Amino acid sequence: MARKVRHVFVLGLIAFVYLSRSSTLAATDPAQEITKQLAGSDARKWVFAKFDTFMSAKRCKHGETYLFTVQHFVTISSCGVDGHVHDEIKQWSIETQDPRETRVKIGDEWYVLIFWKTTKEQFMALRTKGNSKVEPTVDKEFRLAED
């Protein structure tokens, strides 16, 4: 009987160590951490340009937002030349092969993903690297929308 109790205890201890180690590894997975920063627990809206609307919000002058979801879709809402909000849905994915640089693929385009915070707000940038000295690197900077 004591031997069975000891075996159950050892198996329980092994299971505890395994589960605690696997949950620690999952919590420190860079792609999961970045997904959480980008999409939160469900979805997050990032504002590139605040929408300027008129006529009871049916028309717009300018504005652009990206709504990232944990299902790896992004809805890009922008004010079109016709004065209406247009939505475009694309898939996104994270690449973290280089620890110094995180890349995000939105549709067919790759960007360097950068996050930073101030005391009041969170920001991110999607950086497009220039391919030559005459083609500049461009940062598209976003602010996290208030919940």
Image (cartoon, rainbow, N blue to C red):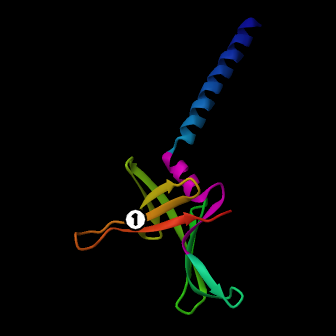
Residue receiving disc 1: 127
Give the residue type that dot 1 points to.
Arg
Give the camera-side residue of 63 and 98: 63
Local crowd size for mark 1, using a 10 Å CA cut-off: few (<14), some (14–19), many (≥20):
some
48 horizontally vs 133: left or right: right
- The residue tagged with tag 1: helix, strand or loop? strand
Query: Is residue 88 visible to the viewer in this orientation of the structure?
Result: no
Specify the segment rendered in magenta: 30-49
- Above-or-below relation of 41 to 125: above
Front-most of residues 115 and 1: 115
Above/below status of 111 relative to 82: above
Q: Quadrant of the N terminus?
A: top right
Residue occupying the far top of the picture: 2
User: Could you say where residue 124 lies in the image, as x and y percent from the top left?
Assistant: 49, 61
Q: Residue furthest left?
A: 133
Give me the residue at 71% from left, 8% from top: 3
Q: Is residue 132 magenta?
A: no
Going 62% across and 65% down the picture, which residue do you hit?
145
The residue positioned 22% from the left and 69% from the top of the image is 133
What residue is rendered at 68% in x and 62% in y? 147
